[in-house]
Image: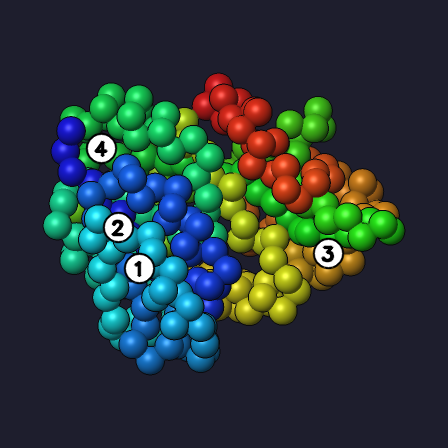
Amino acid sequence: MKKKSAISLISYDANRFLADSIKKYYGYVDEIVLGIDKDRITWSGNNFTIDENELWSELQKIDTEGKISIIEEDFHKSKIAIENDNYERNFLKAQCSHDWIFSFDADEMLVNPKEFFYDYCPIVENYYNKVDILMTWATPYKTVEDEAGESFCLFIANEDDTPFFGENQGVVTSKDSTYTYARWTDKSAGGTANRVRSPLVAVHWSLCRPDSELHEKINNIGHSDIVEKDPFYQIWSQVNINNYHELHNFKTSGLGEAQWPKLRAIPTNEVENYVKEHVTGAYQ
């Protein structure tokens, strides 16, 4: 098969997520190109700090085959966050050695990488460069505790309690494409006709993090300009183990196109197993 390059981003949440994310796909790609702003400034123009000694140590432990490289560059050139988002992804893509590009964010944990890389990728090897190939997100919403102190993940679910697989994201493209809005490229700029779903599922921890870290994220993401108009954070802040069941068909507004049917409480340590149990439902 053709060799594969993966790109990912180092920013404010790298210590919490990045190493675990890379572990999910390290064995299936030939190189991993990571980008970090040279001034430690986010796309939205805010300073960020991480424990770099800890992160570099973790990455060194993972990188047993010398696949990982780290690119430092000015990724905050524009006052418009999404333009910086696009620029960084395109810059990293240009540094890749191979034509087949896989883009994973730090807070995405692949659930079924073996099936995706070994069974699906050979099928699309001859046309991955003509379309945007998508993965499906399974989304934890918030971690809460019950009265006994047990940790539960409130997971976005369907009314039948299966994981909600209603949101897709571009994950595979080719080096000659251009990222035009985060991970969507010019290959599918005209609409969904050139967007092809794959069976790949990732648990997307984007929303499910401590309050202060979530506030940092939603004010620094590529579409941070819409956050102040979005009801998401206010609703999220009020949800707990006692009232989560009251949310049905609640609006995600600018943080997602789809309505979320409900929340289901899952023991936090069972999240990956919960998604794996239903993973085939994402591609039906």
The image's mark for residue 64 is 2
User: Percent from the top left, x then y, of residue 218?
Assistant: 55, 63
Say which residue appears at 45% left-offset and 72% top-offset.
50
The image's mark for residue 235 is 3
Q: Are marks 2 and 3 in contact (CB under 8 Å)?
A: no
Outermost top residue: 284
Q: Earlier in the sequence, mark 2 or mark 3?
A: 2
Type of amino acid under label 1: Gln
Near-viewer residue (157 or 259): 157
Q: Nearer the viewer, mark 2 or mark 4?
A: 2
Distance, label 2 to label 3, CA atoms, is: 43 Å
Query: Picture quarter containing residue 266?
Result: top right
Distance, label 4 to label 1, CA atoms, is: 31 Å
Crowd tier of the residue under label 1, counting other residues whose Cα lies within 10 Å: few below 14, some 14–19, many 20 or above: some
Q: Are marks 4 and 1 in contact (CB under 8 Å)?
A: no
Say which residue appears at 46% left-offset and 44% top-offset.
109
The image's mark for residue 60 is 1
Q: Are marks 4 and 3 in contact (CB under 8 Å)?
A: no
Type of amino acid under label 2: Thr
Q: Earlier in the sequence, mark 2 or mark 4?
A: 2
